[in-house]
Amino acid sequence: MRQNSKTLRRCGGLLALVVSGAAGAQAQIGGVAAQPAGSVAAALPTASGDASAITAAAVVTTPGAGAVDAAPPACAAQRPVINFNRWAENWGALADPCLPRQPLDGLKYIPLSDDGVSYLSLGAGLRERYEHIASPLYGAGTQPSDGYVIQRANLHADLRIGPYVQLFGQMVDARTFQKQTIAPPDRDKLDMEQLFMTVAVPTADGAVKMRIGRQEMAFDLQRFIAVRDGPNVRQAFDGVWADWEHGPWRLIGYVTQPVQNRSVDSFDDYSDGHLTLSGIRLEYQGLGPGDLSGYYSRYRRDSARFLDASGDERRNVYDMRYNGKTGQVDFDIEGMLQRGQVGAKTVSAWAIGSITGYTFAKTTWTPRIGVQFDMASGDKHAGDGKLGTFNPLFANGYYFSLAGLTGYSNLIHLKPSVTVKPAKTLSVTTALGMQWRQTTGDAVYVQSMAGVPRTAGTGSRWTGAYAQLRTDWLVTPNVTASLEAVHFHAGDSLRTAGGRDADYLGMELKFGW
């Protein structure tokens, strides 16, 4: 505790402002799902400083009388909000003189052309999080209990050249303080997180877009291809992204090499042909009460290692998702098949995930009752020439909980939840998760596909249950705070392997400008 107190003081008391916390799946990913994850900005936004962007003043007349004084003109421009994807913000709105100015707006919008369409926008972000995890790997491994601070700082520049071209660069500096076990997603000295060019040309009923360079990429609820915002270092991809939009249709193609993080020197992150992800995706909006999407990806990783296979990994990935809302019911259903090889072993794996909820919109605090169900295959028989362990690819750290105690491999997961909003800027979620293994032949997995030692081939399917509480508070348009607490009660599969109950506490404060 003395060490943890020093850690908190090192943050300058910043985390002491966090006053509440916890999360069910929908609350955890709500901030992510609400963003255009995986998309290039729709035709690049242009500044709207001409007279047509301002609503004409209303003129009131009475029979037999002249016109009365005009009402004050309404401002059609809206101030951008801090976006999950900072490149999607349109600060060209500040070209409109009717929009009230705030401090430092001279750096958020620097016009570079007489018409205001070309401009430069600067921005920054800072995230501080204190975490304490008791019994990593449920105490079955060698990692001790740990309490530490992770810090992520970002600087970015967004250059718009005319109405169709965007150059975006974002640097990251991610640090850990007093963390005993360091993994690649924990720390990254000053490095280039994103650096890309986008060309987006509108068409009669859509747009044609291309994005080239280092970029973040995510699909849907980010179950399997995610920005990885939960850990300290987000996942980026070096490659090309192109899409064609026409009415309700959208066709996307991508050829990428996922960025691998190093923290020996500054600007030393890299990508190469030993790890690649490429594919094609098709989307259709407005099919019944929801939207339908599907994609095929080719995943390649050299020198992969699983409990029952090792060698070059080659997976063909087939994914289908349907999501939407009807009345007060929201739903999201996704399924994935994986076929291929790891070394000499044949891969046959699958996963399904769903989140469904009902919101009592006319009730005080607008409670939402949700149910999350997930299932992923494991390897049933060691030594049979087949590998059934599902690879969650680039999974979202928020999807189950920030505790990192649940991985999307060899899993059956059921979690009811209740979310309430005591205030417009405050949400509180409580949830109870229950977990089983899909097969006892494979291990219990936590995030990053780490298997809990001595669990493969022993114990029962029952893994355990956890209680989760999360609160998210929008303090100001630029500051958010959250707190999440998780208690995991270990089942007999874990206890047989020497595991025990585990606890997690995370307090976070985030600033964006």
Image: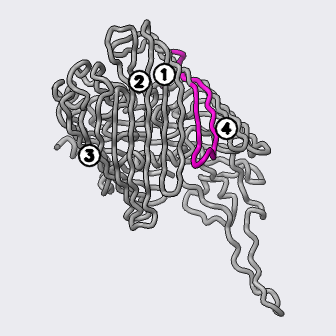
Q: Residue at x 44, y 25 (%)?
A: 350
Query: Which element is circle 4 on?
Result: strand
- First reached walking from the N terminus: tag 1 or tag 4: 4
- First reached walking from the N terminus: tag 2 or tag 1: 1
Residue for badge 3: 467
How far across and down, in percent of the image, does residue 192 sit?
A: 52, 32
- First reached walking from the N terminus: tag 3 or tag 4: 4
Q: Amino acid at mark 3?
A: Ala
Do tag 2 and tag 1 residues touch (Cβ < 8 Å)?
Answer: yes
Residue for badge 4: 250
Q: Is residue 382 left or right of residue 334?
A: left
Residue for badge 2: 390
> Camera-side residue: 57 or 253?
253
Q: Amino acid at mark 4?
A: Arg
Counting other residues with Cα less than 10 Å from the Cα at mark 2, is it few (<14), some (14-19), or many (20 or more)?
Answer: many
Instruction: Give the CA distance from mark 2 to mark 3.
Output: 25 Å
Instruction: Give the CA distance from mark 4 to mark 2.
Output: 28 Å
Q: Is residue 162 above or below residue 260?
A: below
Query: Which element is circle 1 on?
Result: strand
